[in-house]
Image: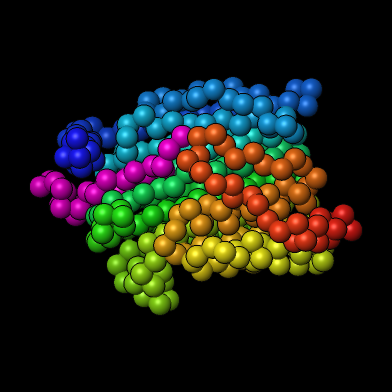
Amino acid sequence: MCIATELKPVAAEREAMQRLDPWHGRCDLQFHATNGSTKHQGGCTAPFKLLRSERGEDGRCELPVLHTAGGLVGGDQLSLDFKLEANSRGLITSVAAQKVYGSIGRSRLQPEGCFAHQQVRCSLASGSDFEWLPQELVLYADALFEQQLTVTLPEDASFLSAEIVRLGRTAAGETLQQGRWRSSLTIQRLAGNSSTWELADRVELGGASLDSPHGLGGAPVFGTLVWAAPMAMGAETTTSLLEGARADSEGLTGTMRCGALNQGLIARYSGESSRDARFWFSRIWERTRTIRGLTRPRIPRVWPLQEQPLRRQTSTVNAFEAAAETH
């Protein structure tokens, strides 16, 4: 039984690598609000599958997306397009961690390997609120992965994203080796015929940057949370948000830093624990809900968490809520 368990990931990886034609999975969804509740329309193609949606306490449509292929190989493409109509609220998460198999040195035709790609486009209308919260991305040794997240929204819409990547299966003593991870995140505010950039963030991890003290310093886990707020926050509210987010790192391992955007927040994690990254981001997520007077977030049922990440000291919560009320 133990032997079969150990061989299963290897067999799965070999089976995935033997596919000759790369997949291009698509997911196109629209969210619209009716009588205080948001519903979704649209659909997806293989290897994507939509699970049953749930209604959040604030009328939010919470929808898990399943990637049925068991992982990505070089050349695979994923395209996700989300459109939120006025005053709609949506939350998208993934059912399980996404795996990216190694491609460097696996093919005699392309010994240099081939990137797997994911492109996510989010278009938000006035008063809408969207949360993009996929589970962990795991890159196997020699895996190549590139992702693009493009967001356009007006000044009164809210967008929150939290993404975590593990570089190598560290539990098995594996590193990323020659692999590489690339990410491009852009958030653009639209106002009539003009636009401004809230954030343009490009990151590439691989090679010397994995171990350099100016890079990850050997840490296998990297994560980014970004929140584009639906209103201009005063100095007092912004300071309380940042101080509260930093306090939320207490008891967690890793390096955690955050800073203000023109109208929002960005937070970074690097360390050994994807659990601690998820816990920290979940607590900041809760703070962004509080500042808007929304209900406390409910951890998606598909997340494999055995502990409650949202527990914080009452005094810290009360201080933040008091600052939010004075805004």
| Identity of the residue drawn at 75% across and 40% down | 295
**Residue 322 horizontal side relative to residue 79, left or right:** right
Q: Work out whether 195 lies above or below 71.
A: below
**What is the residue that sits farthest to the front in this orientation?**
1
Give the image location of residue 21, x and y in percent: 23, 32
- Where does the image place residue 107, in percent across and percent down from the top left? 14, 46
Q: Main secondary structure of the magenta part?
A: loop
Q: Position of residue 303 (x, y in %)?
A: 50, 39
Instruction: Please tell me which residue is depicted at 50% across the width and 50% down the height of the picture.
Output: 163
> Which residue range is magenta in the image?
95-118
Query: Magenta stretch: residue 63 in it?
Result: no
Quadrant assignment for the N terminus:
top left
Write down the quadrant of residue 241 in the picture: bottom right
Residue nearer the viewer, 166 or 43: 166
Assess whether residue 108 is covered by the magenta stretch: yes
Picture layout, residue 45 above or below residue 274: above
Residue drawn at the location 59% of the way across and 22% of the way down: 41
Q: Of residues 287 and 183, which is closer to you in this image?
A: 287
What residue is shown at x 49% (from left), y 66% (from top)? 254
Q: Quadrant of residue 57?
A: top right
